[in-house]
Amino acid sequence: MEAKGFANGDQPPAFLDVILLLGVDKDPKVACFGSSTDDDIMSEDTVLHQIVQGHARINRAAARICTLLLAAAASFALTVSAYLEDLRPTRVGAVLAALIVLHLIWRRRFIWPREFTLYANFLGYMFIVLLWTHDVELAMNTLVPAINCMLAMIFFGSLIEYHSAPTALAGTLCGFLLGVMIYTITQGFPFSFPLDFSYNAIAGMYAFGLFVTLMYSCFRRSIGLLLVIAILILLHIIATTSIKTNLGIALGFVGASIMYSWHLGRLLRRRILILIVLVSTAGIAVASNDVLLGKLVDGVRRVSLGIEVLQARSDVAGYTGFEDRSYWKQVGMEGWRLNPVFGYGTEAFRDRYGITSHSTPVDVLYNYGLIGMVLFYGVFVSLMWRLLKLSNRQVSSQRALVLAGVVFYIFVSLSGTMHYNIFLAAFVGISAGLLDFRGGPSDSTRTLAIKR
């Protein structure tokens, strides 16, 4: 598909500016040529047109390289932060803030859609409830990552809106791949599990990479390599043995398939041969490596176990966490009923029970009440509303992926704390930017510009 066009830094300079830059007279008919015949004038105009075209191509190439580097830097920082403890949230925030400044120097504007307003209000309410929060120092564990989420939304959304969207996605994918390559080299995953392996966090990291890979493939004609990358990422997600991430991806795929069944059928008819070849090749490669095969089998068993737990609604052999989660849900809901509107303050649940509830709805209701619940989950509602309003069938692949992502993150949030997850924030930024552009002008989106 075509890039989103060129603006500001992508535009070639004005015609007269090019002539001045070359050190010639402002009159193109006599500048440095010393002739005024019709043939000579036509020749001069042709030369100047070629100069302008060449300058424009250089501008576009330079702009895309800069976009690629900005996106790669942000994506790399997010990816590394998932497994490198030394990269603290404050440092990630500093990186994102610096990249936003670079973007503003270049573009002097950033996108501010309805989703950002909702999350900004949610973030603001987090600070308001500090007035009755018992442990303010503990609250910083949520506030700093939440600020990073706001920065990630602004950066990725603006990158998609005001730069070449395919280039921004390509840069995001490159940064992600570099980060996971370093993780595999240093930690040995998926061939071995590192010490203190946080399987849900790592699975969330790979899930974001899967979304970016598939979204980027929507803009490319040749997608063979991207499908290979997507399959490899999916195998890594299975190997993490994260139940909620694997089930969330499955539910997202089913939801998108139901809503866009006609598009899925057309896509399968076009890509069925290459999919069969890639899946078969991946299966042979996995079967030939006993260690990797064992990790994938463990992952499949864990997912099957998760389904069994959901069906039984109680602990089963091999899984003993359901009763604990049920208890946290019970005490969280009981506490919320006593203070349903305003909540008890940031990190109040952890402060009282020594642990989070492992459920975003429970944590948000207990800590921030109905106000926080409406503001946070309103972000997902807003994205769904955009999908309903967008009727262009030419972008059905992007719409299906955004819907799958929304279903995925809502499901994962039921059994994890996602209201300050930076990969979710990046997903919202990318999705809002793409849907706003594809849907045309929208009253729900504003551009904030910095005047000269």
Image (cartoon, rainbow, N blue to C red):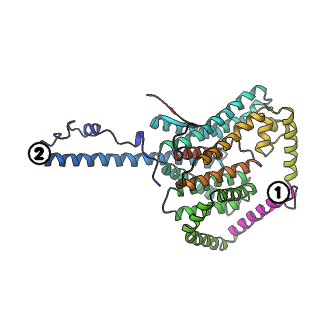
In this view, the residue in front, 265 or 8, is 265
Answer few, some or many: residues within 10 Å of disc 2's Cα (few below 14, many 20 plus, some between 14 and 19): few
In the rendering, at what x and y percent does residue 140 appear?
71, 34
Is there CB contact under 8 Å for labels 1 and 2?
no
Does residue 298 belong to the magenta stretch? yes
Region of the chain picked out in magenta, as a range: 291-320
**Residue drawn 46% across the image and 37% down it:** 107
Residue at image mark 1: 310
Residue 426 to residue 189: above or below: above
Mark 1–mark 2 Cα distance, whole angstroms, equals 85 Å
**Residue drawn 79% across the image and 27% down it:** 132
Name which residue type carries label 2.
Thr
Residue 61 to residue 32: above or below: below
Does residue 103 belong to the magenta stretch? no
Task: Look at the magenta stretch and give its main secondary structure.
Answer: helix
Residue 444, located in which quarter of the rendered image?
top right
Residue at image mark 2: 37
Q: Secondary structure at mark 1?
A: helix
In this view, the residue in front, 274 or 446, is 446
In the rendering, at what x and y percent does residue 94 appear?
58, 37
Name which residue type carries label 1.
Leu
